Amino acid sequence: MIVVLIISLILMCIGLLGIIIPGLPDIIFILIGALIYAIFSHFEKVGISLILIFGLLTAFSYLLDYLGTAYGAKKFGASRLGVFGAILGAILGFIFFNIIGFMIGTILGTALFEIVFAGKEYKKALKSGFGAFLGLFFSIFLKIIIAIIMIGLFISAVV
């Protein structure tokens, strides 16, 4: 069982790192690590209820990515098109330029959609982009807290 525990903890560490390093899997690996341990231990220490809680926390953390970005953009004056641009810019930025593209894509996606489709002047559009960026970082901060709680719950269940 020690090998399964080590594998589970490695997956969880990768999941924690994946929150801040795009390209690595994130919280889903914490869930997978817990699930592997639960299956191999026949759900003795890590039960189905804990796995379900981890599943809900994982789903909530993914929702945070979108809500955080959208909230930040809206709070700084973005339209719905600007919010869509933030999400699209983040995705495309990550695909083509990894973490730097992810951050810059969020700002530029918001600003471009605000200028081109919502007709805003560039200063207001950049302000919206900055808001999307702040919202994204706030959601990352919350995901880190969720991940640490999940890992802590796992360790307390196993020990």
Image (tube, grey):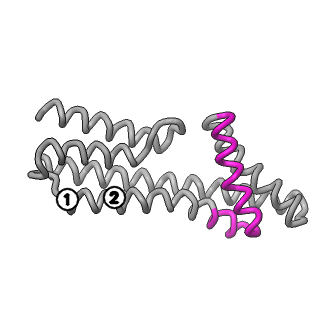
**Residue 85, magenta (yes or no):** yes
Residue 11 located left or right of residue 18: left
Q: Position of residue 145 (x, y in %)?
A: 39, 54
Residue topped by disc 2: 55
Residue 50 located left or right of residue 15: left
Earlier-in-chain disc, 1 versus 2: 1
Task: Tell me the CA gap for discs 1 and 2.
Answer: 10 Å
Q: Quadrant of residue 127?
A: bottom right
Residue topped by disc 1: 48
Q: Quadrant of residue 14?
A: top left
Q: Position of residue 32 (x, y in %)?
A: 31, 45
Q: Position of residue 130 (x, y in %)?
A: 71, 55
Of all residues, the one furthest to the top in this rendering is 3
**Which amino acid, mark 1?**
Ile
Residue 34 located left or right of residue 40: right
Q: Position of residue 30 (x, y in %)?
A: 33, 46
